[in-house]
Image (cartoon, grey):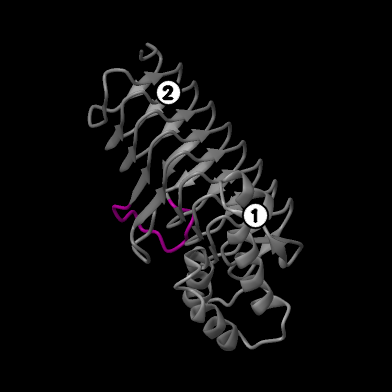
Amino acid sequence: MIHPTAVISDSATMADDVEIGPFTVIGDHVDIGGGTRIESHVVVKGPTKIGKDNHIYQFASIGDDPQDKKYANEPTRLTIGDRNTIREYCTISRGTIQDAGDTFVGDDNWIMAYCHIAHDCVVGSHTIMANGATLAGHVHLGDWVICGGNSGIHQFCKIGAHAFLGMHTGVNRDVPAYTLASGQPAVPKGINSEGLKRRGFSTDQIRNIKNAYRLVYRKGHKLAEAIERIESVLDEQQELLPFLDSLRSSERGIIR
């Protein structure tokens, strides 16, 4: 299961059924879960923990030092969950002590070629990052987010669950949950209704989300007033909670 040309550190640990391809390097303090397959010419440095049933393609660089000039060899981490696909030439950096010290990638993500996940990012589960999508440091990506090809997200931005970023989108503010955004800089274009249908949201739930979106973006309300109106119907429309949380938690301000 481990090719004889692979280089494996004595301090690395892995399940018996892990597959390691030719000329791959597994560095110190790397832990790899069962069923994970790592193709040829991959470099994984630690401390890095990789869960079960992941597939990492050739020429990816996983867990190397953060690209942060303040980094001074502090012990930081990268944590990757289960069943992720990480394609060719992807780069995922460890965290920094200026944040939690841990870059985190959840489960069931599809990360296409040439994507970059920078230090201290938190990526949820079931996301799709199309070719060339780039997350700068400290970005938070919610569950089910889709990042179009060559999209870029500025440091410290938050992208709410089920949001959709179009191709070449440049994000410099937070994107609320469910929102479809595109442009440079990104502007809101409605809600990701097609994605919500595919994930089993009912017609009524999608209508309620659209109405909440209109309160923020179409009715001329101040943001505080829109939040109050959404809060007033939250008991009967729990699907609005991710959208509301995005508005409440924004520190950089939301796209407008």
Quadrant of the image occupied by residue 47: top left
Residue at the (49%, 65%) spot, across then down:
242
Seen in the image, is 153 located left or right of residue 45? Answer: right
Count neighbours of disc 2 (C-alpha within 10 A) and say few if under 14, some if 14 to 19, many if 20 or more: many
Residue 84 visible = yes
Labelled disc at residue 164: 1
Residue for badge 2:
37
In x, y percent, where is residue 192? 66, 56
- Disc 1, disc 2: CB below 8 Å? no
Indicate which disc, 1 or 2, sits on the residue closer to the N terminus: 2
- Decide: is 84 above or below 150: above
In x, y percent, where is residue 44? 40, 34
Work out which quarter of the rendered image holds the C terminus and state it.
Answer: bottom right
Q: Magenta segment, principal secondary structure?
A: loop
Does residue 37 belong to the magenta stretch? no
Count neighbours of disc 1 (C-alpha within 10 A) and say few if under 14, some if 14 to 19, many if 20 or more: many
The type of residue carrying mark 2 is Arg
- Decide: is 209 above or below 113: below
Seen in the image, is 29 located left or right of residue 183? Answer: left
Residue at the (47%, 66%) spot, across then down:
238
Residue at the (31%, 56%) spot, across then down:
74
Q: What element carries label 1?
A: strand
Quadrant of the image occupied by residue 63: top left
Magenta span: 66-76
Q: Is mark 2 on a helix, strand or loop?
A: strand
Seen in the image, is 108 located left or right of residue 195? Answer: left
In x, y percent, where is residue 69? 47, 61
Residue at the (23%, 27%) spot, across then down:
10
